[in-house]
């Protein structure tokens, strides 16, 4: 009985209503926002381009969003995080959900020949993401409620020859989220790691076979359901990627290192 009580959820999940989207102009985030707008949610949209944010805001209000605030920042720049959080404290202090969606995927070959590209890839996808998530973690932990979700990638589950710089940044972020989930669990804050397989967005436009990649609307449906339920801890989307990556992780290193993909 005592053990069962210890395992019980410390605080029940509350309804999702006020959501912060970091990287609001991403192809996947756009679809998530449309579905959240249909539910009448209140949104704070953070992205680099003020013009794209203004257009997005107008569109989401028409689609049913109850509120759509915008904030322009380059989240890869850690120096800009404190000002964003000041804005949130003033205008959106009682947010309940955060989705981190920004990221970049350079051609791996460029990172092999330029340390600047390599460091930028790590900065955008891991270092800055961990830094901004920590601001939200501290706030939600203090309030004892909420949900933090971030999009990593199946590329972070195994270091592949053709994509290991991006993959290591996403793998690092997945590990960070795993630890954060455990840290915030006693406070009643949920942390969701979102691992999409390849999705049709501007990020993958130039890749071969892009037309066969997942539909962002389907991926967004999975993400919105997870945000609503504050579960699962780790979401593979589309679901088949859970099984694919389980199989990929079983391949012995002695064989994996010879594979050219
Ligand atoms: N598409 C896929 O196949 C796939 C698969 C697995 C995981 N993911 C992940 O899913 C998330 C969303 O990606 P997406 O497919 O929707 O890609 P996307 O449409 O290319 O969006 C990328 C987003 O990241 C922002 N961004 C890019 N470089 C940045 C930089 N240097 N500094 C700050 N912001 C930057 C972009 O902002 P701007 O609009 O200002 O350019 C945009 O909001 C990313 O984390 C990505 O790694 C994607």
Image (cartoon, grey):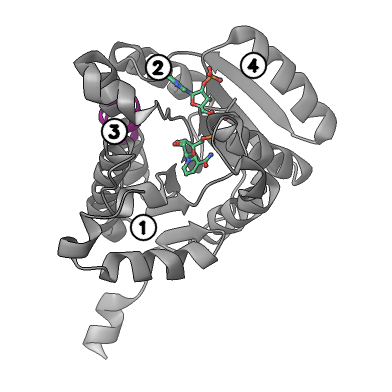
Q: Which of 125 and 75 is in front in this view?
A: 125
Task: From the top left corner, tell me how far across and down residue 93 is, in percent.
Answer: 48, 29
Q: Is residue 214 left or right of residue 106?
A: right
Q: Mark 1 points at which residue?
A: 188
Which mark is nearer the camera, 1 or 4? 4
Q: Is mark 4 on a helix, strand or loop?
A: helix
Q: Is mark 2 on a helix, strand or loop?
A: helix
Residue contact at pointers 2 and 3, CB within 8 angstroms: no
Q: Is residue 99 above or below residue 116?
A: below
CB at disc 4 and ligand 1 closer than 8 Å? no
What residue is shown at x 33% (from left), y 35% (from top)?
166
- The tag earlier along the polypeptide, 1 or 3, is 3
Q: Give the distance between the C-alpha atoms of the residues marked 1 and 4, in whole angstroms.
A: 32 Å
- The tag earlier along the polypeptide, 1 or 4, is 4
Which mark is nearer the camera, 4 or 2? 4
What residue is shown at x 65% (from left), y 45% (from top)?
216
Q: Which of 116 and 14 is in front in this view?
A: 116
- In the rendering, which numbered label is found on residue 126? 3
Q: In this view, does 160 lie above or below 6?
A: above
Q: Give the distance between the C-alpha atoms of the residues marked 4 and 2, in whole angstroms.
A: 19 Å
**Magenta segment:** 124-133
Residue contact at pointers 2 and 1, CB within 8 angstroms: no
């Amino acid at each position: 009985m005592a053990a069962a009580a210890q395992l019980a959820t410390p605080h029940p999940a509350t309804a999702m209503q006020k959501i912060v989207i970091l990287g609001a102009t991403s192809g996947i985030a756009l679809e998530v926002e449309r579905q959240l707008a249909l539910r009448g949610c209140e949104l704070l949209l953070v992205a680099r381009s003020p013009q794209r944010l203004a257009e997005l805001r107008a569109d989401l209000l028409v689609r049913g969003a109850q509120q759509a605030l915008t904030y322009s920042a380059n989240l890869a720049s850690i120096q800009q995080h404190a000002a964003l959080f000041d804005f949130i404290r003033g205008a959106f202090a009682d947010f309940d959900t955060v989705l981190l969606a920004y990221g970049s995927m350079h051609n791996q070959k460029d990172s092999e020949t330029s340390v600047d590209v390599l460091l930028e890839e790590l900065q955008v996808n891991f270092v800055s993401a961990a830094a901004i998530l920590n601001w939200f973690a501290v706030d939600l932990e203090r309030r004892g409620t909420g949900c933090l979700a971030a999009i990593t990638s199946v590329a972070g589950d195994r270091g592949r020859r053709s994509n290991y710089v991006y993959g290591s940044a996403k793998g690092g972020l997945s590990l960070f989220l795993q630890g954060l989930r455990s840290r915030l669990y006693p406070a009643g804050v949920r942390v969701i790691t979102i691992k999409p397989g390849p999705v049709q967005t501007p990020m993958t436009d130039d890749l071969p076979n892009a037309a066969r990649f997942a539909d962002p609307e389907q991926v967004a449906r999975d993400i919105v359901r997870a945000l609503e339920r504050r579960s699962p801890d780790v979401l593979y989307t589309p679901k088949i990627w859970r099984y694919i990556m389980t199989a990929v992780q079983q391949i012995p290193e002695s064989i994996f290192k010879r594979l050219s993909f």
